[in-house]
Amino acid sequence: MEERIIDRVMFKKIKIKSIEFKVVDLLFIACLFFLAFMIRWKLMPVESADYWGFLEGWMVQIRKEGGFPSLGKQISNYTSPYMYIMCLISYITDNDLYGLKMVSVLFDYLASIAVFLIVYRLTYKKDRAVMAMAGLLLSPTVILDGAYWCQCDIIYTTFILYGLYLFFKGNSQGCLILVGVSFAFKLQAVFIVPFLLIMWLKKKTICLRHFLWIPVIYVLSALPAWGFGRDFKELMLVYFDQTGTYPWGTLEYPNIYALLGEAMPDLRHAAQVSGAGTFMTVMLLGCIAYYLYTKRIKLTGELMVTLALFTVAITVYSLPHMHERYGFLIDLIGIVYGVMNVKKLPVACGFMLVSVLTFMPYLIAVHIVPLQYVAIALLGLIIYVGYDLYGQISKQAIS
């Protein structure tokens, strides 16, 4: 059968750096980018409670103070880097809602490129890498968080994803610098640290002294605000103030504290349970580190992604004071986990479903499923990933 002209055009190869694409691949990506943007654009007018309850007021104060000079005052409980972005928005557009959401949308695309690079680096399968990109851009977690809710969790997670990409390339310093940038935006960046420490124990890429980049970058990120007159000690203690604000075991995140009845607004034994939970988290992660450290194994890409997913999920599930959006990083790593082995895609979808159910009380003021049931489902997903990790470790054992 004679080959059609359209087929010859679509399957023509184009090399971009070291990756060889077909025209059909690039056309698919272009359509994906456009349609993903249109999904987000239609959600732009939505004003969430967090926007008109917090973000809108912060932007009003920033404008009142003249933009960047507002950095000299404590307007929000966010760290300086996001306040720089908010100040910049005040100069660019009068529409604060669209401006803030567009920042998150921009990082949606940057994060999608990051997962493409990670999957391609680990598998050298372009088609899977493209599907990982599509998985992130079409993820309900990602769409709801930024374009609908006007939240910015995609920013800190994007830097973690690029940090992981550099880790898989063997660049310890670059990895920890980007984790440091992530930490400067959100405290939740520490969720990836247990994985990196285990990799250091296994002598895989990570150098211990490079962890110093995390506090160094945090300090550097605060210097512009300090230059505008903000108290330096106040800037350094932002995260300490945040952690002391919410005493509940969980703020609508479906973790173990939901099962213990320590969810907002209940306060049965919050201080005692939270203290015990922190030590429990350290012990659980310590057990994982001990087990991995004593095993002689081949660290494959799939095994390391599984370990990253497992340690992040364990951390969020067992640490106290987790907010409803703190599982965001789990979902993004879960996309990589599912795409690398398509049999595990249902697990990635399961994590996303947990996130969507967790978001609903804040977005529509309804618990579609009781929080305790969602916590049990999440525990089941984590156990599955742990069992999968154990199977991979056994398979990769070196005698």
Image: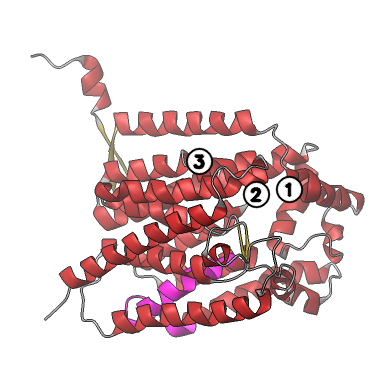
The x, y position of residue 359, in whole percent, is: 59, 47
The x, y position of residue 180, in whole percent, is: 56, 70
Check disc 2 and report the residue beneath it. 151
Check disc 3 and report the residue beneath it. 140
In the foreground, 339 or 18: 339
Answer yes or no: is residue 310 visible: yes
Q: Residue drawn at (47%, 42%), measured in percent from left and top?
A: 139
Label 1: few (<14), some or many (≥20) within 10 Å?
Answer: some
Gap between marks 3 and 2 measured at Cα: 14 Å
The x, y position of residue 264, in whole percent, is: 68, 60
In the foreground, 128 or 5: 128
Q: Marks 2 and 1: in contact by CB < 8 Å?
A: yes
What amino acid type should be assigned to the residue bearing mark 1? Asp
Q: How is the image coloured?
A: secondary structure
Q: Quadrant of residue 325?
A: bottom right
Q: Residue drawn at (8%, 14%), measured in percent from left and top?
A: 1
What amino acid type should be assigned to the residue bearing mark 2? Gln
> Magenta segment: does it hold 193?
yes
Answer yes or no: is residue 150 visible: no
Gap between marks 1 and 2 measured at Cα: 8 Å
Labels 3, 2: front one: 3
Gap between marks 3 and 1 measured at Cα: 18 Å
Farthest residue toward the right?
64
Helix, strand or loop for disc 2: loop
The residue range painted magenta reads 188-209
The x, y position of residue 313, in whole percent, is: 45, 64
